[in-house]
Amino acid sequence: MSATARLIVRRGRPGEPPSTSLYEIPYTPGASVLDGLRYVRAQLDPSLSVRHSCINANTCKECMILVDGKVEYACTARLEPREMKLEPLPNKAHLKDLVTEIAPPDERLDHALAARAGVGA
Ligand code: FES
């Protein structure tokens, strides 16, 4: 019998009542939590929102989430053959599911568009 990782993922958008989804995925030794989330999106639920860019290089910092209540990079946190609770960062603006606004305010598109239009952002 192969091992399974059980990912309990906080879902939803701001203003919606929070919900969770449980995904049971095959555990592979050495796999990251991000590998598991990418498996979920590819094989089980493409509606799950997760942000990442560099994929396991630990340079973009876009994959930061809470793993069992602790801030982690999903690309370096190891997937484990047990239940793992995954949530968005609590101190950032929540966008959807595990995605939060991590760009500094002066680097965001809305700030750039407001500056271009001559409106303070
Ligand atoms: S995916 Fe880039 S730091 Fe994790």
Image (cartoon, rainbow, N blue to C red):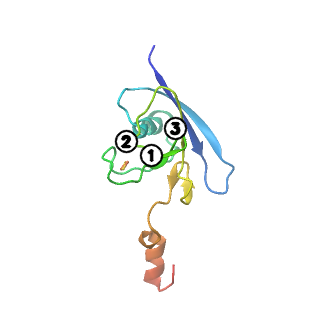
Quadrant of the frame with the N terminus? top left
Name the kind of residue labelled 1 in the image.
Glu
Q: CA distance from mark 2 to mark 1?
A: 8 Å
The response on whether ligand 1 sits within 8 Å of label 3 is: no
Establish if 102 lies above or below 38. below
Q: Residue furthest right?
A: 17
Q: CA distance from mark 3 to mark 1?
A: 22 Å
The residue that appears at 37% across and 41% down in the rendered structure is: 76
Question: Of the residues under marks 2 and 3, which one precedes in the sequence?
Answer: 3
- Circles 3, 1 touching at the beta carbon (< 8 Å): no
The residue that appears at 59% across and 45% down in the rendered structure is: 11
Q: Residue furthest top?
A: 1
Name the kind of residue labelled 2 in the image.
Thr
The residue that appears at 59% across and 43% down in the rendered structure is: 10
Measuring from the top left, give residue 106's x and y in whole percent: 44, 73
- Circles 2, 1 touching at the beta carbon (< 8 Å): yes
The response on whether ligand 1 sits within 8 Å of label 2 is: yes
The residue that appears at 47% across and 26% down in the rendered structure is: 81
Where is mark 1, residue-wise? 72
Residue 76: assigned label: 2
Callout 1 crowding tier (Cα within 10 Å): few <14, some 14–19, many ≥20 = some
Measuring from the top left, give residue 118's x and y in whole percent: 47, 86
Q: Residue furthest front?
A: 70
Where is mark 3, residue-wise? 45
Q: Tell me if 9 is positioned left or right of 112 in this view.
A: right
Compare residues 7 and 66 and report the one nearer the observer: 66
Q: Secondary structure at mark 1?
A: strand
Q: CA distance from mark 2 to mark 3?
A: 22 Å
Name the kind of residue labelled 3 in the image.
Asp
Question: Of the residues under marks 3 and 1, which one precedes in the sequence?
Answer: 3
